Amino acid sequence: MDERESNIYHQGGTVSKLENPSLYYFRQITTSVEGLGLASFSTQEIVFFDYLKKAVLERPLSIPRTKVLSEAIRKRSTVQHTQKREILDLLRCDPQCILRVLNAANTSAKNEGKRTSSLDFAVLRLGMEDVRAHLFSAPSQQFFDKCVDYHETADQLWRHACLTAFLSGRLARKNKLYEEFAYLGALFALSSPLLLFNLAADLRAKLGEKKEPVEWKTFQRFSDVLSPQLGGLLLCTWKLDLRLVNVVEYFQDDQRLGKDELLRQVRIAAACATYLDQRKEFGVEWLKEEMERLGDTTPEATLTRDLDDYFEQFRYHMRHFDG
């Protein structure tokens, strides 16, 4: 058991809190980034790293709404009678709003002392009127809107996270695993790089136009190392189930695949999403090798047929965000 797990209190399988999650993850992040070699950092990378360390200790992290997601929610908020299904479809693609809804359900007088990390249970506990209010009255990310050159990359990351989550849920249902945690674990794991976008946009706004703008490419090499740890901190802060925290924090850790079936399921979904998103670069042979490495024995013809069907379902699921 590592330091983080030994400091977590369990209440019905749900993470209560670390003794000091910010301090724990601050140490982890500092060690990880220093391992990249500080001597090779550009001035911008050093500035961003210093700002990131300060932010981890002093401010709550949040996953920003991308431009496409913000526009879709804004349009639906002006419709007087939005259907329940539409509200839930939008909510399930908004990771930060999911956290707010879960928190509201867990702090509600109706929770009877029982915490939940299930979005379905949270919606039932709160009722659709409260869920609608959380979705349509969420604070806007105004500084993110100023960073126009971030939009395309952020939207691509967000769509890929949604696709991975959708596939993870569908594959878990087929394999008789916990579908909702497979969905949420994938969504939070693949959305974690957007935490860096949020911090970068905030830093750019603070530096102002007089200084050289902070470009995404200057700190992109931080993403693989820091995104899982920032995501772990985010979920610990909101006191989510340890199983979800582990999926996010250890998403890239191959050594844990054999002892964490939920993590393995999310990794399989991530490989399938990469194949569907980038077939020219990652073809059937790559997918077959990746499935074998992850221990999935589904016949190639069955897998590709199922993925094509899931992809069509996903496109319908995302119809709210296409114009």
Image: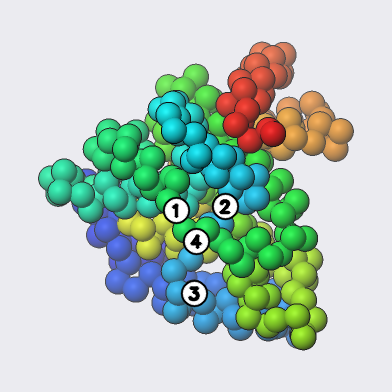
Spot the residue most to the right.
280
Amino acid on which disc 2 is placed? Arg
- Tell me residue 112's x, y (percent): 13, 45
Label 3 to label 1: alpha-carbon separation: 22 Å
Mark 1 vs mark 4, foreground winner is: 1
Q: Earlier in the sequence, mark 2 or mark 1?
A: 2
Label 2 to label 4: alpha-carbon separation: 9 Å
Q: Secondary structure at mark 4?
A: loop
Q: Are marks 2 and 1 in contact (CB under 8 Å)?
A: yes
Q: Are marks 3 and 1 in contact (CB under 8 Å)?
A: no
Q: Which residue is mark 2?
A: 65
Q: Which residue is mark 4?
A: 62
Picture layout, residue 91 above or below residue 54: above
Mark 3 vs mark 2, foreground winner is: 2
Q: Secondary structure at mark 3?
A: helix
Q: Which residue is mark 3?
A: 56
For the point 72% across and 37% down, the residue is 274
Q: Earlier in the sequence, mark 3 or mark 1?
A: 3
Picture layout, residue 303 above or below residue 109: above
Q: 10 Å neighbourhood of mark 2: few (<14), some, or many (≥20)? A: many
Label 1 to label 4: alpha-carbon separation: 12 Å
For the point 65% across and 70% down, the residue is 200
Q: Give the label on residue 138, or none.
A: 1
Residue 251, visible in the rendered structure: no
Q: Are marks 2 and 4 in contact (CB under 8 Å)?
A: no
